[in-house]
Amino acid sequence: MAAAQAVAKGSVVSPCGYRASPGLLGRRRGAVGARIAPSAVRIGGSWKKTAFLGGRLAVGPRRSRPESRNLASPVQMNMNLAIGKSMRWWEKGLQPNMREIESAQDLVDSLINAGDRLVIVDFFSPGCGGCRALHPKICQFAEQNPDVLFLQVNYEEHKSMCYSLHVHVLPFFRFYRGAQGRLCSFSCTNATIKKFKDALAKHKPDRCSIGPTRGLEESELLALAENKDLQFTYTKKPELIPSGDAASEHTAPEPAKLPGATKPLIRLGSEERSLVSSGR
């Protein structure tokens, strides 16, 4: 009966007998506060007990908390860029005669434009530990041999091109010079660096090539052209056929030469060239 009177007067009674002062509810704007929840509630003219044991309760509009945004400052962004750039180990210690290849066409043009200059093509991968360990020594060789051109091919950026050139092991090197084309190819590490030193000492002396610069083998050029992933075009060179005047000269009877002699053809790569018999 006392509880009913208290509720009627606007008070809230807890099971422990604590009575809240009238007018406590609705004191805060936009919220309903209760010191302790009642043990009995009147619903539809009848009193029903609740299982709530009481406690401080505040009900009101939910205030949204400002979201914290992890926005990097310009200083932090520059620092991240600097760290990312410092991790590009293959760009450290580069010499003026060292350059990274950007495409298949770039590789072909670089070899052709080198003329009689010795060219060393270095195939590497950023994730190759042997390539990274060998890179400082390659830079030293480039510094000691400024007349030699060093071309770097990043395997991760040119996988399709390396596949067409049959490069399946890293680090890998190929030596080229003038009309001779490819001189040698091999793989080596710090433990077998003597291979590189011997090849450099053997092919470094200046030589004059007779004929146009050869560069890649014709079979390699055709493989690059057939690769749909590469924007590279190449047309197979026609076989050398004597012109009309030259043919008439060969067919004309000459007493000093054996009549009807056929000149041998030697295949260099996939290109046939006629060799004039020199009497050897």
Image (cartoon, rainbow, N blue to C red):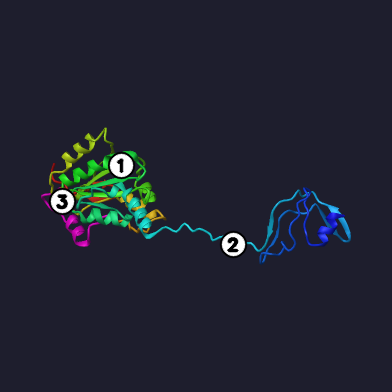
Point out the stretch of residues depicted in magenta.
239-257
Residue under label 1: 132
Task: Measure the alpha-carbon separation of dots 2 and 1.
Answer: 52 Å
Q: Sequence order check: which comes first, mark 1 or mark 3?
A: 1
Front-most of residues 64 and 86 = 64
Give the residue type that dot 1 points to: Arg
Give the residue type that dot 2 points to: Ser
Q: Sequence order check: which comes first, mark 2 or mark 1?
A: 2
Query: Looking at the image, which residue is at 33% across and 56% down?
Result: 103
Which of labels 2 and 1 is toward the front? 2
**Mark 1 falls on what kind of element?**
helix
Query: Looking at the image, which residue is at 15% across and 51% down?
Result: 210
Query: Looking at the image, which residue is at 22% across and 62% down?
Result: 244
| In the displayed structure image, the side of residue 125 where residue 279 appears, left or right | left
Picture quarter with the N terminus? bottom right
Q: Which mark is residue 210?
A: 3
Residue under label 2: 64
Front-most of residues 143 and 101 = 143
